[in-house]
Amino acid sequence: MSQVLTKCPKHCAKKGLNIDPKHYKKLIYAFSTFFLSILSLIFLVWVILHPSKPHFSLKEVNINQLNISAPHNLVNSSIQLTLLSNNPNKKVGIYYENLQVYASYKGQQISVDTSLPPFYQEHEETNFLSVDLVGNGMPVGPSLGYEVGRDKIAGKLVMSLKVSGRIRWKVGTWVSGQNRFDVNCVATMDFGSPVESSSLSTKQGTQCSTIV
């Protein structure tokens, strides 16, 4: 019986198989086409829906304590506030995460960062957010005591309430990556007569600026 020998290319002999390089090119092309199609679909949905950033407004602020001790320039504060958060989108939901709130006066932080629990906001939904802000012995600049005294004489105090965190958009079952957002609300309160800062409050709704 004669023996039949079949020759194999060198690369086949080394690897034990013979694969056509064209097969790799087809796989790479198919994967690239699928990936680009998914990206195009997401971009198209994003452009069509064009989600709007959330709207925040300040409903109520109560300053129960705002004292600055000298000569160490330490502030003690106790502030209660209620924020109104609104999702203006008709087809886009919003996840709120890593929420932090604090109070600022004359550009200086006068309360510690207070965390809010994460939550999901449906289309065109509105939520109330109540926060208690506290600052015990927080160091501030030497000019802050002077600023408080000057505002007492003027009879008006202007304070900023800051909110920061991360949001994710939800369209159907698709959820976007995290986007940072910052909110700045300005509260203007009148000092009573006689001029004292032991307790101040305002219930005038104020629109806040939001940056995403």
Image (cartoon, grey):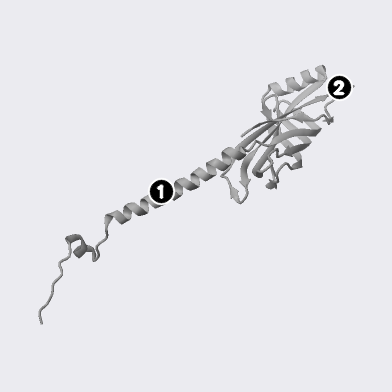
Disc nearest the viewer among 1 and 2: 1
Q: Is residue 59 above or below residue 98?
A: above
Residue at point 62% right, 43% down? 169
Q: Where is residue 138 drawn, in percent x and y?
A: 69, 33
Q: Residue at x 75, y 33 (%)?
A: 57
In percent of width and height, residue 208 lies at: 71, 30
Residue 120 location (% of width, % of height): 68, 47
Q: Residue at x 71, y 23 (%)?
A: 144
Amino acid at pointer 2: Val
| Residue 98: quarter of image | top right
Q: Quadrant of the C terminus?
A: top right
Horizontal and vertical percent for residue 190?
A: 83, 23
Q: Examine the rendered structure and indicate whether residue 70 appears above or below residue 33.
A: above
Give the quarter of the image for residue 146. top right
**Looking at the rendered structure, which numbered label has been put on residue 211?**
none
SS for dot 1: helix
Distance (Cα) linking label 1 and label 2: 70 Å
> Considering only order in the chain, which callout, 2 or 1, is on the residue closer to the N terminus?
1
Q: Is residue 146 left or right of residue 182?
A: right
- Comparing 197 with 41, the one in front is 41
Q: Is residue 79 left or right of residue 91?
A: right
In the rendered image, which residue does mark 1 sit on?
32
Task: Please state, as top left, top right, bottom left or bottom right, where the N terminus lies in the image.
Answer: bottom left
Tell me how many marks there are: 2
Residue where numbered disc 2 is placed:
195
Query: Is 207 in front, or is 111?
Result: 207
